[in-house]
Amino acid sequence: MAKSCSIIHSYRAFPRVLDAVAQLALNSLCGSINEMKRLEEMSNIFQSSGVENHPPEPKTPAEGNEKSKDKEEPWEMVMDKKHFKLWRRPITGTHLYQYRVFGTYTDVTPRQFFNVQLDTEYRKKWDALVIKLEVIERDVVSGSEVLHWVTHFPYPMYSRDYVYVRRYSVDEENNVMVLVSRAVEHPSVPESPEFVRVRSYESQMVIRPHKSFDENGFDYLLTYSDNPQTVFPRYCVSWMVSSGMPDFLEKLHMATLKAKNMEIKVKDYISSKPLEMSSEAKATAPSSERKSEGSRGPARIEYA
């Protein structure tokens, strides 16, 4: 496999979640890294030519192979903002979409952006939708962590909770950072009647500095999907995800700026370097259940 994907092959999970982590789409992650390079190259071409920057739709693994029996749906651009572009595509055999975001920031460093996403204690301070977010189990050798995350959903929906394993990787040689997460089962976090458990969730984020980890400027490619257990039709869920995404990205950006300005201390996950890490990004959508006031939240969908 290409050198740019070498960071993935050392992905070792601790025993309790080994089976779940082994199912992660590692080849897909390599594809995300390569796709990011393609989007960056096209973006640079547009900028240098003075043409308005509209990166092409991401490629699917099946494109170019007309004989593929399981050809994936093409990506459709649904949002084109100053700092990011959002695509979606139907997940075959379901009513759900997979989402992909290609974004750029020039006023914060990759290290700061990376650390803010991984710092669970800081997340509780800048994200008002978090009800609970804690590490359930950690493997000190590999850096794998199992987390339990509970988030508000739009009224009158039940709040959702996620149990997932996350892993991160910093490849200094290839100048890339990767965060990966996937839903798992864990015996210490049984389902609660207070929340709706989301059992299907995957997220991958690739961060590529423009120069270095500690200089302002980077691109990122985020690919995620989940099944929030909602009875709403696909177009409703898609609308909620699309409207919630700009808000979440702005909150994440502002939290990173605060960390940069030393208004808040954030753990440096690169220096602590637990071999590899993961990310979370996810969209969540509701169902028309009613709950106690404590489990209701503002009309937004949250991402981890």
Image (cartoon, rainbow, N blue to C red):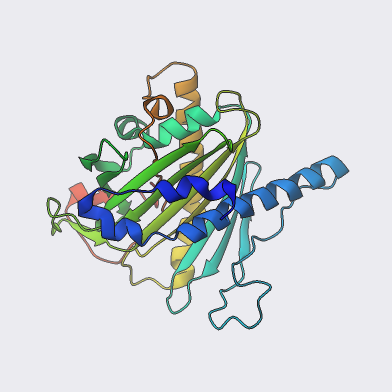
Q: Is residue 204 above or below residue 28?
A: above
Q: Residue at x 50, y 28 (%)?
A: 111
Q: Residue at x 49, y 64 (%)?
A: 98
Q: Residue at x 13, y 55 (%)?
A: 187
Label tally: 0
Q: Is residue 247 above or below residue 225?
A: above
**Residue 280, horizontal then vertical, whole percent:** 40, 47
**Residue 243, horizontal then vertical, whole percent:** 50, 53
Q: Is residue 298 above or below residue 190?
A: above
Location of the N terminus by quadrant is: bottom right
**Residue 245, horizontal then vertical, whole percent:** 49, 49
Residue sitting nearer the eye, 170 or 205 = 170
In the figure, is residue 303 to the left or right of 108?
left
Residue sitting nearer the eye, 291 or 21 = 21
Image quadrant in which you'd find residue 142: top left
Q: Residue furthest top?
A: 262
Q: Residue at x 71, y 53 (%)?
A: 55
In the figure, is residue 70 to the left or right of 115?
right
Q: Is residue 156 visible?
A: no
Q: Residue furthest right?
A: 49
Q: Is residue 168 visible?
A: yes
**Residue 15, horizontal then vertical, whole percent:** 21, 52
